[in-house]
Amino acid sequence: MKKAKLLALFTITFLTFLSCRNDDGNIEFVPARDRGEEVPASTAIIEDYLQTHFYNYEEFANPPADFDYKIRFDTIAGDNSDKTPIMDMLGDQLQFKMVPDRVDEGVEYKLYYLKVAQGGGETSPEFPDITIATFEGIWLNEENATQAYTNLFDSSVVPVTFDLTGVVNGFQDAMVEFNVAESIVENPDGTVEPINPGIGAVFIPSGLGYYVSTPQGSGIPVYAQLIFTFHLYSSSQGDQDNDGIPSIFEDLNMNGLEEDDDTDSDGLPNFFDADDDNDGRPTSGEIEVREYINEENPTLLPNEFIVTTETNDDGDLVITTVEYIDANNNGIWDHLDDEI
């Protein structure tokens, strides 16, 4: 479920080309379709699926004794003709939001997500956080008649750790709408079980999925829409470049995207750049990190803010803060100022 990033480090180009053979047997290269023009087609495929399919809502309403609380989809036909389409739940369990394309500015998608259970925890993941969840991934294909309409391509009943900056954008955009579990219980056999986790599904247009850059060996067709179901267990704050500044605070324009904040224009967004201003000094050396032990309301300096509040193994309350510094008083924080 990795997503392509707009990073020079990976030398990724989004002018991806598809290869095929012509009548003479020679390989031809076909440019990827325009992402903006692909939006209505993707939306129509997903909305048709939502109109013609239901999920096992009756089991969630009256759970059998051995119910695993997994979302299962099926077609409205035959014995299931009287089931309620997912689309008819719009405004209740089915919701959507408009989210931007990460490649072409001005392109937007309607991202549908099914909220079966909000989750009983007090917090939701932020977009650059690290989450733990179980999941199933299905591709939805209407491109190639020789391939199945839907197919399971990835899943895990064991909790998996996901860096939300490293998954397909549509999955990232949906996870932030759910709360983590109320608690996590460890069973005698060593497995863990979430109490009241966030339970949902997301229906991802191809432009927020893999588009034409499908993972090798996955079998996912190009331009396929994706469906993920999941149980969200927990979430922790992400600091992908380990510079001491949580990645949520490196979203300088506060647009909820991690890819487009690049202070030194070196191709590495700040959340992935250990030297944000390219002055030769690591960001971690241009800030002050402090810990307050068992101080519920520490007195903070004007440029100091709390980044984490945790309880350690000894039962102590540990509040970690970061102070931004402007050593030359020019109005620019040192970690963003290449003059220092």
Image (cartoon, rainbow, N blue to C red):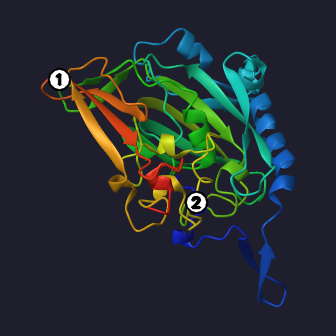
66 left or right of 118 in image: left
Mark 1 residue type: Asp
Q: Secondary structure at mark 1?
A: loop
Identify the mark at residue 5; answer none if there is no mark.
2
Q: Position of residue 339 (x, y in %)?
A: 49, 63
Q: Position of residue 321 (x, y in %)?
A: 34, 34
Q: Of residues 110 and 142, which is closer to you in this image?
A: 110
Residue 242 visible? The answer is no
Q: Please give the residue where the numbered disc 1 appears in the rendered image.
A: 316
Q: Of residues 10 and 181, which is closer to you in this image?
A: 10
Q: Earlier in the sequence, mark 2 or mark 1?
A: 2
Mark 2 residue type: Lys
Q: Residue at x 41, y 51 (%)?
A: 327
Give the quadrant of residue 111. Answer: top right
- Packing grade of label 2 (10 A; few <14, some 14-19, many >=20) is many
Give the quadrant of residue 104. Answer: bottom right
Quarter holding the C terminus?
bottom left
- Packing grade of label 1 (10 A; few <14, some 14-19, many >=20) is few
64 left or right of 200 in image: left
Disc tally is 2
Q: Position of residue 25 (x, y in %)?
A: 77, 89
20 left or right of 117 in image: right
Q: Position of residue 120 (x, y in %)?
A: 44, 16
Q: Secondary structure at mark 2?
A: loop
Q: Residue at x 50, y 40 (%)?
A: 248
Q: Residue at x 41, y 22 (%)?
A: 181
- Is 154 drawn above or below residue 281 in the view shown? above
- Is 302 drawn above or below residue 127 in the view shown? above
Residue placed farthest to the front in the image?
A: 329
Q: CA distance from mark 2 to mark 1?
A: 39 Å
78 left or right of 2 in image: right
